[in-house]
């Protein structure tokens, strides 16, 4: 994944535009793409920042965490559900979440989903 260009370069491009240079002219002078110069200047005008926003990281777990009680209640009501079945039950309550998001939720909360002794063994395990 590419890294963000330096904050100093961004600031110099924005200051050149603010001093009267066109966006394309500033992009040529500092050897960056015109699209980058446009985006940097727009973020400066709208938000007052020249720094890059953080890259990568978790973008969605906060939405899942906000519904932690619903997930726990649904799971504890029927702990034998498969993740895709749990996802479908949650969708009935208006929470759209992926199976992998549920798996990460359980891992974050230290909830293990082991098979119970009442669960039949797989056919492969039988002799």
Image (cartoon, rainbow, N blue to C red):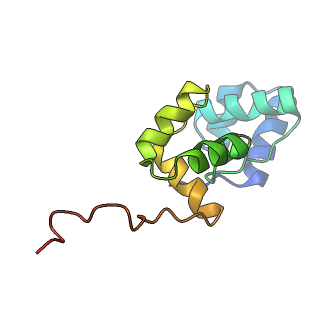
Is residue 60 in sight in this rendering? no
Q: Position of residue 54 (x, y in %)?
A: 71, 51
Q: Which residue is drawn at 89% across and 35% down?
A: 48
Q: Which residue is drawn at 69% across and 31% down?
A: 39
Q: Position of residue 2 (x, y in %)?
A: 53, 54
Seen as rendered, the residue at the extreme bottom is 127
Q: In which quarter of the image is residue 67?
A: top right
**Foreground residue, 57 or 27?**
57
Say whether residue 14 is left or right of residue 79.
Answer: right
Is residue 71 in sight in this rendering? yes
Q: Where is residue 21 in the image (x, y as percent from the top left)?
A: 77, 27
Q: Which residue is drawn at 63% across and 54% down?
A: 57
**Foreground residue, 44 or 20?**
44
Q: Which residue is drawn at 75% across and 40% down?
A: 13
Q: Quadrant of residue 94?
A: top right
Say whether residue 126 is left or right of residue 3.
Answer: left
| Count of picture labels | 0
Seen as rendered, the residue at the extreme front is 118
Vertical relation: 51 (above or below) 109: above
**Foreground residue, 121 or 40?**
121
Vertical relation: 15 (above or below) 78: above
The quadrant of the image that shows the C terminus is bottom left
Q: Position of residue 122 (x, y in %)?
A: 22, 63
**Foreground residue, 64 or 87?**
87
Say whether residue 89 is left or right of residue 31.
Answer: left
């Amino acid at each position: 994944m590419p890294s963000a260009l330096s904050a100093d370069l961004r600031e110099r491009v924005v200051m050149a535009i603010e001093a009267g240079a066109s966006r394309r002219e500033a992009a040529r002078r500092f050897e960056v793409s015109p699209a980058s110069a446009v985006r940097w200047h727009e973020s400066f005008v709208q938000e007052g920042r020249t720094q890059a926003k953080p890259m990568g990281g978790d973008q969605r777990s906060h939405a899942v965490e906000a519904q932690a009680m619903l997930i726990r209640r649904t799971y504890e009501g029927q702990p034998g559900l498969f993740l895709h079945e749990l996802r479908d039950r949650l969708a009935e309550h208006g929470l759209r979440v992926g199976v992998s998001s549920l798996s990460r939720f359980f891992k974050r909360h230290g909830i293990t989903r082991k098979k119970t002794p009442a669960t039949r063994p797989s056919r492969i395990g039988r002799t």
